[in-house]
Amino acid sequence: MNNYTDTLRKHNLKATPQRLAITDSLCMHGHMSIDALYDVMIKKFSSISLATIYKNINLMLENAFIQEVKLPNLKTVYELTKHSHSHIMCEKCGKINDITLDLKAIVNTVSSLENFEISKADLVLSGVCKNCA
């Protein structure tokens, strides 16, 4: 397990064994649902409850240590907070990858066309990956 103690502390979070394990899992798998996190965590902490995982995830979200990715017609997944990016998702295998796009251009175009002030932009593009095609 990597040592994320300092990174957690920089986000005003105590480095508990559960938070370190969540961080390690997200680092290793990239994007994970609560259910997938629970499956990993129950193997490491046999008495951990789903409520404990939700509590830790919510606290990590509040402190911007992780972020949620809302996927169309699927459960939300979580990832470690990193640079601004969007996502592509395979509709067949469910794999999610990060992509870097210039969302500022899209936001500016929509704002000027619709006279609408956009405060947040998340983009998930879905299709079929080359492995599933």
Image (spheres, rainbow, N blue to C red):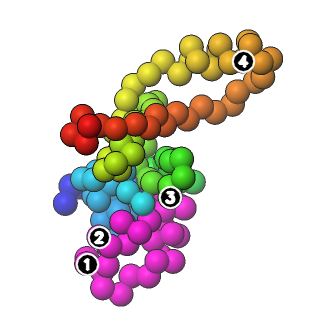
- Taking the image as shown, residue 114 lies to the left or right of residue 42, namely right
Task: Give the residue type at disc 2.
Answer: Val
Counting residues from the N terminus, which is met first, the one under dot 4 or under dot 3? 3
62 above or below 106? below
Disc 1 and disc 3 in contact, CB within 8 angstroms = no
Task: Give the residue type at disc 3.
Answer: Lys
Magenta region: which residues? 34-60
User: Badge 4 is on which residue?
Assistant: 111
Counting residues from the N terminus, which is met first, the one under dot 2 or under dot 4? 2
Mark 1: few/some/many CA within 10 Å (<14, 14-19, 20+)? few
Q: Circle 2 — which element?
A: helix
Q: Work out how far the residue at label 1 is from the one at label 3, CA to CA, in angstroms.
A: 22 Å
User: Badge 2 is on which residue?
Assistant: 40
**Most foreground residue, 53 or 106:** 106
Task: Give the residue type at disc 4.
Answer: Ser
User: Badge 3 is on which residue?
Assistant: 75
- Taking the image as shown, residue 8 lies to the left or right of residue 114, namely left
Q: Which mark is residue 43?
A: 1
Image point (58%, 18%), residue name: 106
Disc 1 and disc 2 in contact, CB within 8 angstroms = yes
Can residue 12 be seen at all in this image of the molecule? no
90 above or below 108? below
Image point (42%, 60%), residue name: 33
Counting residues from the N terminus, which is met first, the one under dot 4 or under dot 1? 1
Q: Work out how far the residue at label 2 is from the one at label 4, CA to CA, in angstroms.
A: 42 Å
- The x, y position of residue 75, in whole percent, is 50, 58
Instruction: Name the image quarter holding the C terminus.
Output: top left
